[in-house]
Image (spheres, rainbow, N blue to C red):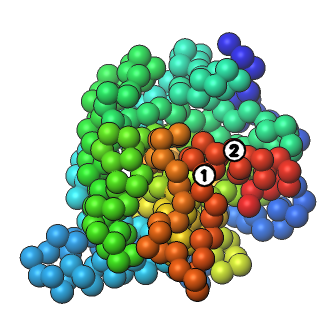
Amino acid sequence: MGTVAPRVESLASSGIRSIPREYVRPKEELTSIGNVFEEEKKEGPQVPTIDLREIDSEDECVRAKCREKLKKAAQEWGVMHLVNHGIPDELINRLKKAGEGFFSLPVEEKEKYANDQASGKIQGYGSKLANSASGQLEWEDYYFHLVFPEDKRDLSIWPKKPADYTEVTSEYAKKLRGLASKILEVLSLGLGLEGGRLEKEVGGMEELLLQLKINYYPICPQPELALGVEAHTDVSSLTFLLHNMVPGLQLFYDGKWVTAKCVPDSILMHIGDTIEILSNGEYKSILHRGLVNKEKVRISWAVFCEPPKEKIILKPLPELVTETEPARFPPRTFAQHIQHKLFRMTQEGLPE
């Protein structure tokens, strides 16, 4: 085992009244961190909700209207609540129960699944290691593993408890992969491209990787000083997020932090950097972060749909580059894009 970061859950349950220094955010950030329950009640701009019921309508007009709404949300916000998404609520509830079941095991039991980030083994149970630049830690533990395509999974590191974890997680991943295809098609058409184009550009059925990260945010004695996840944009093509109905997600919209309201039976979807690059900035990858609180544990299930690391060169699609709209992003592999972001973070101490 490499260095194991302290588990935030152990810290939280140790009875501390104040949090260790490395979890305290820099001064300039603290002014914007409020009480998430108050923040959720605020009026003001709201993350759009897209009803997908009409995406497969018989009526072309109805379908077009639905596509238009989704496109607009992707251009203006880059994040949206999807309702009537076609994934059975019963399956989602079982998935959440399985994840909650794993996190309710004693820490010693979870440690059997510990990852070893130092040696590059990132699948498994973990907590963030300090990135050397700021030494900052985030108030969360997590479980991370690849869930699709099925032939690329390593089932040996999937939780054995609860007993149905593998079954429900596999089923959810399969259903979500279908939803991702549907969304990518709408986004392709929205760019004036053929429906299958973006899907092909991010690796298609064989190569697009679905990585599940279950985020576990314990109760925090000083939530006004910490973040569950620091501000970042997702590197993925798309990210699909479920949560246990405890607010925490904030989006940086129009120069301000906006707290996403909890929308029942929805899946929250982010456009990631990969699609922002391919679309030459037409679709936005929005800066977001996670707040914590002192009353309720928050759990979220994020599935990142990632292109293969080396096989594809990500750059604005040639049809979208013109003299008036030059390419806004240099060609990079997915791996190079991640390196570039990490480098920027270590240089400036803050994400771009």
Give x and y (percent) for residue 218. 63, 41
Rendered residue at 49%/63% (across/down)? 278
Residue 53 in the figure: left or right of residue 14: left
SS class of the residue under badge 1?
strand
Q: Which mark is residue 22?
A: none
Q: Residue at x 70, y 76 (%)?
A: 256
User: The residue under label 1 is which amino acid type?
Assistant: Arg
The reply to whether residue 215 is in sight is yes
SS under mark 2: helix
Q: Is residue 244 above or below residue 119?
A: below
Relative to 316, is 94 above or below? above
Q: Which residue is mark 1?
A: 332
Taking the spot 54% from the left edge, 60% from the top edge, the residue there is 315
Nearer-the-camera pick, 318 or 206: 318
Q: Can residue 106 be seen by looking at this rendering? A: no
Sequence order check: which comes first, mark 1 or mark 2? 1
Q: Which residue is mark 2?
A: 339
Whole-Å distance between the Cαs marked 1 and 2? 10 Å
- The residue furthest front is 323
Describe residue 140's horizontal placement relative to residue 284 as left or right.
right
What is the quadrant of residue 97 in the picture? top left
